[in-house]
Amino acid sequence: MTSKLPEPVVLENAVVRLEPLAMGHVPDLFAAAGGDDEVWRWLPAGTPRTEAELAKVARNLIDDDRHVPLAVVRRESGRAVGWTTYGDVPGFDESVEIGWTWYGRAVWRTAVNTACKLLLIDHAFALGYNRVLLKTDVRNERSQNAIRRIGGVHEGTLRRHRRRPDGTWRDTVCFGILDDEWPHHRARLSTPREGGA
């Protein structure tokens, strides 16, 4: 039974390299999205306005044993353009969540998100997880569409699930992909292309 978080690892394909998040990534990450309210709008930390604020968010995530944070490095530039994490392994259903994901606006609607999800989901199922979970704010339609596009099946909505940075209540939309569903979706997505989510 797979009941613990994956170990930090480097995963790569032709588009991105995912590597354990480190403080050395912070300057690139701040250049990619520091102070951009639209990038940080749906994330629990709020918008970091300075590199020092982003460094504090990164440090907290690195030190949080409930997540395995990975920097998203675009292969063509060698620069970090966002981060993503594995987290939430309850154990009883052999699932793992992929979340706490953001990318700088310059890579939205490119092959980056699809390339990341291919790596993360492949790795999760290779480790023996039965199910990959993806969650997002009910108001974040762009994220919901991206999750559906990679094969996420809507499993329900957790009402008043958590507070947003502005103090309002967030309803969380939950999606899942099962290990036996993934080969079909993977074949469809196996050639990431510009214009993806």
Image: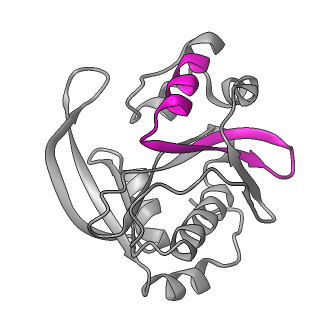
Residue 102 location, quadrant? top right
- Looking at this rendering, what residue extends furthest in the left direction? 159
Height in image: 24 above or below 83? above
Q: Identify the magenta region.
A: 54-83
Q: In this view, does 180 lie to the left or right of 36?
A: left
Residue 96 location, quadrant? bottom left
Q: Where is residue 179 in the image (x, y as percent from the top left)?
A: 44, 81
State whether residue 44 appears in this view: yes
Q: Which residue is rendered at x = 43% and y = 52% of the image?
A: 142
Q: Position of residue 164 (x, y in %)?
A: 28, 29
Q: Where is residue 114 in the image (x, y as percent from the top left)?
A: 61, 64
Q: Which residue is rendered at x = 83% and y = 52% of the image?
A: 75
Q: Where is residue 111 in the image (x, y as percent from the top left)?
A: 68, 61
Figure quadrant of the N terminus? bottom left
Q: Is residue 2 left or right of residue 153?
A: right
- Looking at this rendering, what residue extends furthest in the front direction? 1
Figure quadrant of the C terminus? bottom right
Q: In this view, does 116 lie to the left or right of 144?
A: right
Q: Within the magenta stretch, is there residue 163?
A: no
Height in image: 90 above or below 137? below
Q: Which residue is rendered at x = 26% and y = 48% of the image?
A: 138
Height in image: 197 above or below 103? below
Q: In this view, does 114 lie to the left or right of 173?
A: right
State whether residue 110 appears in this view: no
Residue 160 or residue 62, whichever sits in front: 62
Residue 62 location, quadrant? top right
